[in-house]
Image (spheres, rainbow, N blue to C red):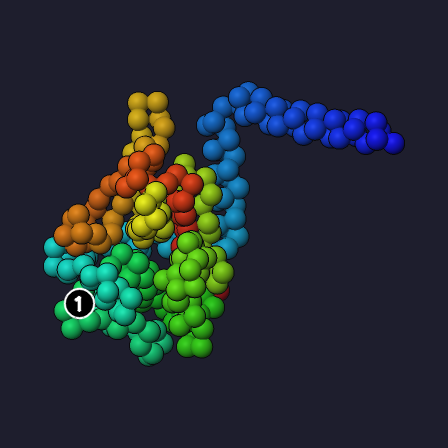
Amino acid sequence: MQEKRQRLLINSVLIVVSLVAAFFVFKMLIPQEEIVSSHKILLEKKIRKMGTPLNPYILEVIEKFPKGVYKICDSKRVKTCFGVTRDIYYQGKKIASTTPDHCIYCIGLVFEVFMDAWELYDKRSGRQNIGCLDKNNIREFRKRFYGVYGNKKTFVDALTRYGLGVEITNPELAEPGDLVQFWRYNNTGHAVIFKRWIKDANGKITGIQFWSAQYTTRGIDYHSEQIGPYRHNVRPDKIYIVRPIIPKE
C-alpha cells in the first residue's frame, strides 16, 4: 500500500512538471507579439460588449489643468481631505470638498478628472448619469475609488465593481487615458493617468510615463518613474490598470 501511494505521488509530480515544462515550451514557440495580439482581440471584444472607452474625454480634461498652480497636501491633510481642486457634485449632491487652499494629492486629482470626464461626456451626449451610479451609491463608489477599505487596487476595484471599467492585466495593452495605481518597493503608492511605457533597446518595459500630481513636479504635470528592482522604484507586480468604460444605455 505504501509503495502504491509513493508511485501515485511520483506520477502526480511528473504530470505537474510536464505541464509546467509544456507551458514554457508553448511560450517559447509562440512569439510574444502573437500573444499580445490575441489578448488585445479579447480585450476589445469585452470592451465593445460593455460600451466605449472614456479615455478620449479623460485626455481632453487633463490638458485643461494648469501646471504649478495647486500645491500638494501634506501627509496629515491627505487623511482628512479629498485632494480635489474644486467641490465635486453628482446629481446635485456634493460628494467631495476642496480645501480653502485647494491642495491636491494624486488619487483625489484622478477622481476629479474621472468625474470631469464624465461631466464632459454627459454634456455632449445628453446623459445625466454615470452608469449605475446614483445619489445612494455614489459615496460608496468614491470610497472604493480612494481605497479607504485598504484595497491596493483602489479605483481598479471601484470601476470594475460598478461596471464602469475593464481591468488591463497585460501591461502591453495599456493605452493613454487608462487609470493606473502602482506601488513601490518601499510600500508607497501613486495614482496616475497613463501616457506610455518606457522601454529599453530590447523592448522590455523599464519605466512608466504618466500625468498626475506629485512633489517632484511641484504639483500637476507629466512625470515618469523607473520600474524595479530598487527601493524607490515601482514594483512590476504591483501595477494595476483599468480602462474606464462608458456603459451602453
Using the image as rendered, state which of residue 130 and residue 16 is in the foreground: 16
Q: Residue at x 70, y 25 (%)?
A: 14
Q: In this view, does 4 lie to the left or right of 53?
A: right
Q: Residue at x 37, y 55 (%)?
A: 54
Q: Is residue 83 visible?
A: no
Among the 4 quarters of the image, the one containing residue 69: bottom left
Q: Residue at x 35, y 26 (%)?
A: 203
Please state which amino acid type lies under the numbered disc 1: His
**Measured from the top left, where is residue 168 in percent x and y?**
45, 45
Determine which residue is flagged by label 1.
Answer: 102
Q: Which residue is drawn at 63% across and 24% down?
A: 22
**Measured from the top left, where is residue 151 in percent x and y?**
44, 57
Using the image as rendered, state which of residue 75 and residue 246 is in the foreground: 75
Furthest-left residue in view?
A: 69
Above or below for 154 versus 184: below
**Measured from the top left, where is residue 117 in percent x and y?**
31, 60
Q: In this view, does 139 lie to the left or right of 23?
A: left
